[in-house]
Image (cartoon, rainbow, N blue to C red):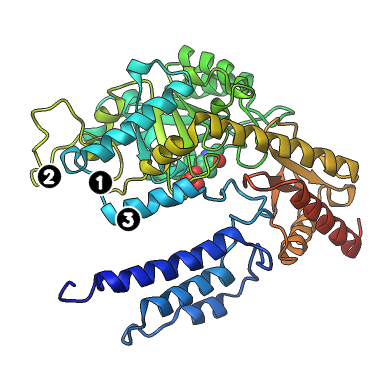
Amino acid sequence: MGSFGFDFSAEERRVIWDYLVEKLERHYSDHSGVRVAPPLDPEAVRDYCSVDFNNPVSPQDAIDYVTAGLDQYIVHTSHPGYYGLFNPRPSFAGIMADVVTAVYNPQMAAWSHSPFAVEAENYVIREIGRKFGYEPDSIDGTFTNAGAEANHTALLMALTRGVPGFAENGLSVSEHKPVIYVSQESHHSFVKAAGLSGMGRRSVRNISVGPSFAMDAGDLRRQVIKDIAAGYKPVMVVSTLGTTGMGAIDPVKEIDIVAREFGMWHHADAAWGGAVAFSSRYRHLIEGIELADSITFDAHKWLSVPMAAGMLITRHPSALLETFRISADYMPKEGKEFEIVDPFTHSIQWSRRFAGLKVFMSLLIYSWDGIERVINSQFETGILLKRKLEDSGWKIYNDTPLPIVNFGLAGLEGNQEKATRFCREVTDSGKVWISVYNTSGIGTLRACITNYNTDEKDLDELLKTLGDVRITMGD
Ligand SMILES: *Cc1c(COP(=O)(O)O)cnc(C)c1O
């Protein structure tokens, strides 16, 4: 036993592990009687968290306290009635990997500290890059905390390539103010990244969308020409492949033509939708993604691993190094004589956890074939959901083939406030969780198949809840 008691004894640990596993297993295997979403009461939660750190409790009591807090006060994304914002039910392989990572705690900053962990991540990045259609020899990338960081990384690469001297001297050296292009329906992490990079949030141009809510490439070209005439420097355009709100898929090939014509970095934000690359039946939906200079993909979405496992993958092997290279005297140098890359010279983060193990172990245990079967089945559940909604008289606003439905009623159309109240009534039932998505003045209800266990009887529960609220609120 360690002299401070941090480790507990081996016998004690065995008892505590068993206790912990029993608790977690109960949560993981049975959601009956659990509210999908808690009632929101900040006072009550703050009260619950205000414990006395001067009086230690037993690990078992601590486990009870924390799991009871989680049971009551979080949205349960692992519940089959959660039709939410791409947060998955975490798969068992992914959960195991996170436990292993916590125990071994590899430090990912320097290659020489964690050769297995760094190379396992590199291998996963290359395998996924190949699935996206990149040439095997050109693939490089990094795990990120999540999609927002991957998008930020792409912007920094675009600025490094597009504004000579950017990394050393910043934007002041740029004769022309840089601008980037995204669709109106894109993820707002680009706005944040533009602010953080020093370009300023106003450097983000929102390009209009067509009837399928996908970017209008003609409008993109017109805006670029206008900006160049006004003295701006277009540095990046983003194709979103599976928008967060409606699952729209931008015309990546048309966008690529504009990117090449004007020398812009072309980034594909496929944080959720990128997973269709793993299905031979659906990969055509994102055909052309291999043209993009870089890709954002989140394994903690449609690959169903626990958060956080974002990835930035690129077909330019030196671009990350050009962007992030730095030398630090205190970092270990043991790897110097080998042809290796220290991750801290190659990414935004420095000390970092072994996020890639979740993906590595999922593929090892489930294989590509297992992943493909889950993705195909979620597509089918999405098709079934759309059919059931239509059969019950709901209007559907999006036409994406991805398993995400924006729906509503005549009485909700154009009434975003009523749609929000309707949604609140639905989630207050505790049985299901959906969200509201406002676009083009329409308040739509949004349901996405994010849990691989959601099946037809869960869909029927959703339809029933929707029907009940429709009766209480009137159409
Ligand atoms: C989820 C998402 C993001 C942001 O990713 P995080 O993992 O939440 O940081 C960016 N773009 C798209 C299209 C997304 O769906």
SS under mark 3: helix
Mark 2, other Cα within 10 Å: few <14 / some 14–19 / many ≥20: few
Q: Which badge, 1 or 3, is on the more N-terminal residue?
A: 3
Which amino acid, by three-letter code, is at mark 3?
Answer: Ala
Looking at the image, is 144 positioned above or below residue 402? below
Mark 3, other Cα within 10 Å: few <14 / some 14–19 / many ≥20: few
SS under mark 2: loop
Report whether 224 appears left or right of 411: left
Q: Nearer the viewer, mark 1 or mark 3?
A: 3
Residue 471, horizontal then vertical, whole percent: 91, 61
Residue 55, horizontal then vertical, whole percent: 33, 87
SS under mark 1: loop
Mark 2 vs mark 1, CA separation in Å: 11 Å
Label 1: which residue? 350
Tell me whether the residue at label 2 lies in contact with that at label 1, contact meaning CB atoms closer than 8 angstroms: no
Report whether 443 appears left or right of 199: right
Residue 139, horizontal then vertical, whole percent: 35, 22
Label 3: which residue? 102
Looking at the image, is 341 positioned above or below residue 62? above
Please name the residue shown 50% across and 80% down the image: 48
Tell me whether the residue at label 3 lies in contact with that at label 2, contact meaning CB atoms closer than 8 angstroms: no
Mark 1, other Cα within 10 Å: few <14 / some 14–19 / many ≥20: some
Q: Nearer the viewer, mark 3 or mark 2?
A: 3
Tell me whether the residue at label 1 lies in contact with that at label 3, contact meaning CB atoms closer than 8 angstroms: no
Residue 345, horizontal then vertical, whole percent: 22, 36
Q: Which badge, 2 or 1, is on the more N-terminal residue?
A: 2
Please name the residue shown 32% across and 46% down the image: 354
Looking at the image, is 22 positioned above or below residue 211? below
- Tag shown at residue 138: none
Report whether 202 appears left or right of 124: right
Label 2: which residue? 331
Residue placed most toward the observer, 373 or 185: 373
